[in-house]
Image: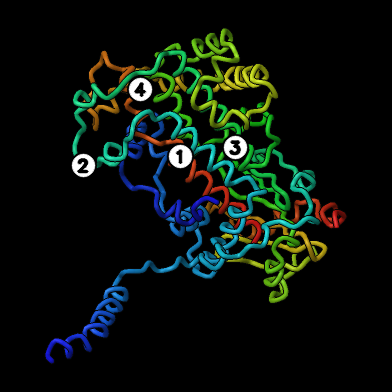
Amino acid sequence: MIFSRWRQILAPLLLSVLLLVTACGGGKEPSRFEGAQQQKTPAVVQESAKGGSFNKYFPKTSGDYSLTYTQEKKGAAIAKLKKGGKDVAELSITDTVNTPDARDKFKQSTQRIAGYPAATQGTTMTSILVADRFQVKVRSLDTSFSPIDREAWLQKFNLSGIASLK
Amino acid sequence: MSKPIFELVDQLPTDNMTVKSLRALDFVLPGEWQNTVGFVNTIRTVTGEEDEDLIQQIGDRAVILFNDKSQGYQRALWLYQTIDSAGSALGTAALANKVSQNISFLSFLGNITPKPEKAQTIDFSLKVITELLAFCQINGIPGDSIGDFVGSLAQYSGESLVRMAALVCFDGLVPLGANFLQNALQYIGGMTPSELEQNPAFKQIGDQIPGGSTAGKLGFIGESVSSVSGWMSNFVAGHNLTPQNVASNLSRFVDIADDKLDYLGAFLDMTTNYYEHTGVQTLARRLIERAVAEI
């Protein structure tokens, strides 16, 4: 009689213990990047411009400044701007046909640079959207490179050339 | 499909044999390598941004870029991982993770067999090629552009530069001696395609190497090593590097006998994975640089 009473409570008791143990650290918390990890969409689309087509529209440099191309991938061209041999900024042209969400910040901004919609991100980036498609961005790598410097260098790109890529 | 990039960077060790041996190179490149680990930490370090929304956007885009095989990042990771695992002859988990005490090198002597010089030379050369190929996959320069790669070496810094320093010191100077470059070029010049085909590392990564036939690939390898030899010779001379001073700096955490440098080379081969470790760091940095440009 006592034995059958124990049998009645054993299964629920064991189940409760199991749930308790699992809840107290049996499972790993998913990463904050798990959502992106589960996305199956390609990073670049067929119609994206090639990074190589952007290279000639980067600013020309002189004097203490020099430009070194660092990445050239489909939809992105990136270069480092050096002053006196020291990295001061990262310049890039990217095709937002691969990252449509990147255009949202321009809709929310009233700023304009060289006549194009402009936006800042964080404390280090200023960008403009050319022909509603190509994002031209300057990112400070050194505290000596100010937001004013970023705006000045954005205007040194061949922006009409970039627009002609559309 | 590889592990998620955020996991790879999160799981980078903060201290093990690889980390100790790279820190031992601080005498060559003071402060150049910081062993940045953790995906979010790397985003903060690379971008200087602290805003959590921005970090999320950057991380998400980096994950999507890495996961798209057509973008080449997984191929680069595979190259870095494969060249390191091809070099290790014995199971090394316990030894590689030894973090606390000085390692009594002599007690492992019985388990170490130095590779013949020719095999060591091939491995050194294949590590050069691996760097070139991974560089092209990550940065997008055409796959056989030796000239562009050599030009880029002048821009190498941080984890990429320390990887090259380790290649010169651990895979060049220590096992092959002060004349490692001349010897490498000589051996490659006299090598037959079938000798190359016997090499375990070549068996793994060989089909990634431009050149068509094995003879063609051998030619490409020779050309690549020849092209970087200028940079490497200048690096050795500029930092006054010798097999002895490299060994002496390693002796801070490994007891080394002076006359056992070829064993030291094999020992490092077995117990470190500096290509994979710093390769993951380089990959993460480049992904984040691209992601931050695109968001």
Q: CA distance from mark 4 to mark 3?
A: 25 Å
Q: In the rendering, at what x and y percent does residue A51 appear?
A: 74, 47
Which residue type carries mark 3?
Phe
| Sequence-wise first label, 1 or 3 | 3
Camera sees residue B27: no
Q: Residues within 10 Å of mark 1 (few under 14, many from 20)?
A: many
Camera sees residue B262: yes
Q: In the rendering, at what x and y percent does residue A58 appear?
A: 75, 47
Q: CA distance from mark 1 to mark 3?
A: 14 Å
- Which residue is identified by label 2? B100
| Sequence-wise first label, 1 or 2 | 2
Which residue sits furthest right? A164
Which residue type carries mark 2?
Ser
Q: CA distance from mark 2 to mark 3?
A: 34 Å
| Sequence-wise first label, 4 or 3 | 3
- Which residue is identified by label 4? B265
Query: What chain does mark 2 sit on?
Result: B
